[in-house]
Image (spheres, helix red, strand yellow):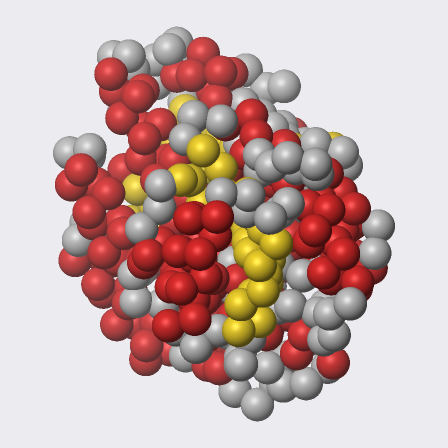
Amino acid sequence: MSTILIVEDEMIIRELIGETLSLEDYDVLQAGNGREALALLEKTSPLPDLIICDVMMPELDGHGFIEALQTNPKMATIPFIFLTALGTVQDFRQGMNSGADDYLVKPFKQDELLAAVNSRLQKKAKLSAYYQGNQPEPGEDQRQSGGEKTPTLTSEELALWHDLETALVNNEIYLNYQPQVAIGSHFLVGCEALIRWKHPQRGFISPGVFIPLAEKVGFITQLGEWVIQSVLQQWDHWRSLGLPSIRVGINISAQQFHGKGLVQTLKSGVEKYNLPAGFIEVELTETLLVKNVEESIQQLQNLRSQGFRVAIDDFGTGYSSLSYLQRLPFDVLKIDQSFVRDIDKNSKNETITATIISLAHQLDLQVTAEGVETWEEYHTIANLGCDELQGYLFSRPLSVEDFTALLSRGLETPLTPA
Ligand code: C2E
Ligand code: CA
Ligand code: CA
């Protein structure tokens, strides 16, 4: 049984919330302002599992209260839901920055209250399981890979996870677009959407850090859905500006790929914007696909029957044999940077890459080289018949503004190397 502390100065609201929660079998504690709540917490043991707190209150308001909680390590980790009045976005931002986990805008419905409460309590249960190093309720991804011990989170990861959840609402997360260029003509033929996070205190955090974390804690699907929506919206915006239609690659993680919603999200997204599905290229890593080949084949067929393109990302880094290629229905093979790096000086990599490219072409696949940085690398992969490239030699990932400027030059203007 979970205990919930309600801190609210308006008695009617406080009692209404209390009644709703009692009916759901929660134990309820009540306080009329921050000071009362602190006094109550001092003499309450064990501490409540969740705090629901109004922002505006006499004596000690919600901000003051949460600040006081942050100074006590035991209390700082209690999940905290703010109650705000409509239109006080500023309050909300400040609340989230000071450590709240969620918020409800007044007036809210019973369902909304219960949904927020349940989701927070579930997270808390998961979190304490991580802390104790138990086998918690495994995330979907882990369930599929079977039997692996769920990794524990370091306090650094816990802090980052907390920040990541608020980052989306606070607009700290956005996309960059990296151009893809045709070998030979140097025309712009597509791009890849790459996620970015500018943390208000810590500056830029690499997707190489927060994507694996989001996968670990089960936040990746939500993040991935956001990426899909943002790309589609951006595509629609470019079209409204009269800019040429461009192919966009979207990275999809294992959990999102194996989950149920992916095809539906993409399908309803392109329908909403009346966007031809062929401009969306779903990027999936080789490692992800070979983990469960039969299921992957099915899901790839679902995607392609809706008209989406599919690219195999980071090709060569998995341990799959080339024979898998024949079984998986896809359109593009992206050769990993590690093969491209110094390919002009590494004859082994050159031989492997030559084999991959010729096999891919026999299967009617398009080949893109990733991470091309020098003209030497360019010439080597060009001689091997590679079709497209993506790499710093022509362009780093660009901000939306810079990519839009590039697009406005038209698709038949060769890119000039950086
Ligand atoms: P990736 O899918 O292999 O993306 C290519 C990465 O290579 C990007 O790093 C890009 O900035 C970098 N890159 C491109 N050209 C060059 C080059 O010439 N030299 C070098 N050294 N690097 C180059 P980034 O943006 O840091 O992304 C890292 C990884 O994070 C991505 O690898 C992808 O696995 C993941 N990621 C990024 N955005 C998303 C996303 O929206 N969703 C998911 N699930 N994963 C994402
Ligand atoms: Ca990629
Ligand atoms: Ca890649």
In the displayed structure, does residue 4 sit left or right of residue 293? right
Tell me which residue sits at (64%, 40%) in the image. 62
Residue at 23%, 56% in the rendered image: 264
- Considering every residue shown, the one lying at the far bottom of the view is 147
Relative vertical location of residue 180 with respect to residue 413 in this rendering, above or below: below
- Picture residue at 48% right of the left edge, 82% below the top: 143
Residue 389: percent from left, percent from top = 50, 37
**Residue 358's spot in the image, x, y percent?**
42, 56
On screen, 159 above or below 401? Answer: below
Whether residue 206 is visible here, answered yes or no, is no
Rendering quarter of residue 135: bottom right
If the image is split into quadrants, where does the C terminus sit?
top right
Count of numbered tags? 0
Viewer-nearest residue: 15 or 279: 15
Q: Please tell me which residue lies in front, 328 or 25.
A: 25
Between residue 368 and residue 135, name the one nearer to us.
Answer: 135
